Image: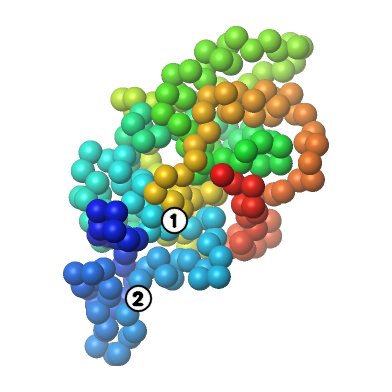
Amino acid sequence: MSSDNGRGSGVHGTATGGGPLTAVGRREAAPGGEDELDIFRRLRDEDGHQVGEVTAAGAAWLSSAATHPRSTLALWEGRPAAPGVLPCGTVFDVVNVPSMFGRRMLDHLWTEGPGSGPVAVHRGRMLLFAAPGTAQRLPSLLEWEEWHGSDVAVPPLLCHGSGDAVTVPALVRPGPDNTGAARWLVAPDTRRPWLPGPDVLLWACVRAARNEPTDAPRISIFPRADQDANVYDVSRRR
């Protein structure tokens, strides 16, 4: 991918087949006459962005966390199907929770709360991208919370902040034969996505741990039978 220093989408990628990228990020026509292909045009639904897909602006935001954003974009340009490793603490923190507990947290965030920032899943864990500083404050807030009943407990949370790095899913959705690969549930789609802070995630953790029913009708952001279906409702997302 290539950066445009804030003057447009600036991020394009490759796809299998076809010729090399040109200087402006478009694929040259293949010898057989294949049309030019912009990987983000292939990923996006032109009539409505699919939340499980990274946009060009979202990729630019992710790369801004790297020490060398341009080099990171160039690497993703050549290998859009490969996961990346990014440092935490400056652009975002990450709260890493067991998958089932994370599902309950997201149910509350989306039905009763403000929504969520980017969210990824990998190896039975859910990674919730949060505002910088969350990794330091959230564990303390959880310790101070008054739990009414000894049967209420939050499972072990891994909070990644300054000095930590996390593996982020590939920009493109993994194929159906790669079910164990990391993938985005809510992919970054803007250059400045809203990120929940420690107070919001504390609220979600408490309700998920108590297994409280949601007051609003359930809005599921989790795919059911069709893993590729666009089942996300982001009407309340900030």
Q: Secondary structure at mark 2?
A: loop
Residue identified by numbered label 1: 54
Q: Is residue 165 above or below residue 77?
A: above
Proximity of marks 2 and 1: CB atoms separated by less than 8 Å: no
Q: Is residue 220 left or right of residue 31?
A: right
Q: Amino acid at mark 1?
A: Val
Q: Percent position (x, y) of residue 170?
A: 39, 53
The location of residue 226, given as percent across then percent down, is: 65, 62
The amino acid type found where label 2 is placed reads Leu
**What is the x, y in percent for residue 222?**
64, 50
Residue 107: name its quadrant: top right
Looking at marks 2 and 1 on the same chain, the residue that comes earlier in the sequence is marked by 2
Instruction: Please say whether residue 170 is visible from this viewpoint.
Output: no
The extreme front residue here reads 7
How far apart, in angstroms, are the residues tagged by discs 2 and 1?
Answer: 16 Å
Number of numbered markers: 2
CA neighbours of label 2 inside 10 A, class few (<14), some (14 to 19), many (20+): many
Looking at the rendered image, the quarter that the C terminus falls into is top right
Q: Residue at x 71, y 37 (%)?
A: 112
Does 185 appear above or below 212?
below
In this picture, residue 157 sits left or right of residue 164: right
Residue 37 is marked as 2
Residue 64: x %, y % from top left: 30, 43
Crowding around mark 1 (Cα neighbors within 10 Å: few <14, some 14 to 19, many 20+) is many
Residue at 74% x, 24% y: name it: 210
Residue 174 relative to residue 216: left or right:
left
The N terminus is located in which quarter?
bottom left
Q: Which mark is residue 71?
A: none
Tell me what residue is drawn at x 80 percent, y 36 percent: 215
Q: Is residue 15 left or right of residue 174?
A: left
Instruction: Report the residue at 35% width, 71% height from top.
Output: 38
